Image (cartoon, rainbow, N blue to C red):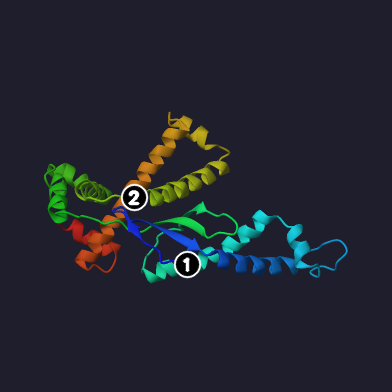
Amino acid sequence: MTKATITQKPDGTLTFELTLSSQTIADTYQQVLSEVGKTAEIKGFRPGKAPLSMVEATSDKSKLYSHVLEHLLPPAYSKVIHEHQLTPLIEPKVTPKGMEIGKDWTLAVEVATAPTVDLGSYKQYVKTALKKLKNLPAGKAGDAKPDDKLNLIFDALLAGSKLVVSPLLIQEESKSALSRLAKQLTELKLTVADYAKSLKKTPEELISQYKKSAEANLKLHFILSAIQKQEKATDRKTTLDILSAL
């Protein structure tokens, strides 16, 4: 396998190519064929005793090569991750670029990592946001709930910080949220389309809403992580306490 060249975007998306040599593929193919042969049942032979040539002739080649890829991809991917000390946040997106039999295979890999976060003068803009609570009339100020304060802080952080989150992360986060929603709706014998209709939205609009929510949640996560690191806070609660006290 040739050494991978990593390309990194500001949103934390890393891309690189994996090249698997034709010789490695051929060797692994023979290993896979031997594994299949151990349990293959072919008429005229006891299970696992048929010649490999017959096992190969009666097997689905695409499935055999799929098993070859399953053998080779994980270690090749892990090697690049360890060599470059990368920290992927989700499973990689792998797209075959060239997988012709008898030749090297080339795979395009996309990996999502944490984005670069520009916090700006976060203490100043959080202070400015919290003044809205402090400047409320005495009666109304007493009615303010802890969540109101946190929401002001979160809105200020999202507006004042600069970062772009990997589309891979947004897709994964929104997909998970929609899966949870679908499960809850199934228990109520409803569909996502039914739920969207009850909100006077199309399913597409609902999905778009979930993607926006996923993006905001991810941004907030990375912003708070960056502040926690900068403030040397021990945990997220301590970080929020520091921001609330501004």
Q: Is residue 20 visible?
A: yes
Image quadrant assignment for residue 223: bottom left
Q: Position of residue 87 (x, y in %)?
A: 37, 65
What residue sits right under mark 2 in the picture? 217
Name which residue type carries label 2.
Asn
**Which residue corresponds to the image point at 85% horizontal and 68% vertical from the top-left?**
46
User: What residue occupies the far right of the structure in this picture?
Assistant: 44
The quadrant in which the C terminus is found is bottom left
Q: Position of residue 43 (x, y in %)?
A: 86, 61
Q: Position of residue 33 (x, y in %)?
A: 69, 66
- Frontmost residue, 131 versus 212: 212
User: What residue occupies the far front of the structure in this picture?
Assistant: 102
What residue sits right under mark 1 in the picture? 1
For marks 2 and 1, the one nearer the N-term is 1
- Frontmost residue, 34 versus 199: 34
Question: Left or right: where does residue 102 sit relative to residue 214?
Answer: right
Q: Is residue 145 visible?
A: no
**Which residue corresponds to the image point at 49% horizontal and 35% vertical from the top-left?**
195
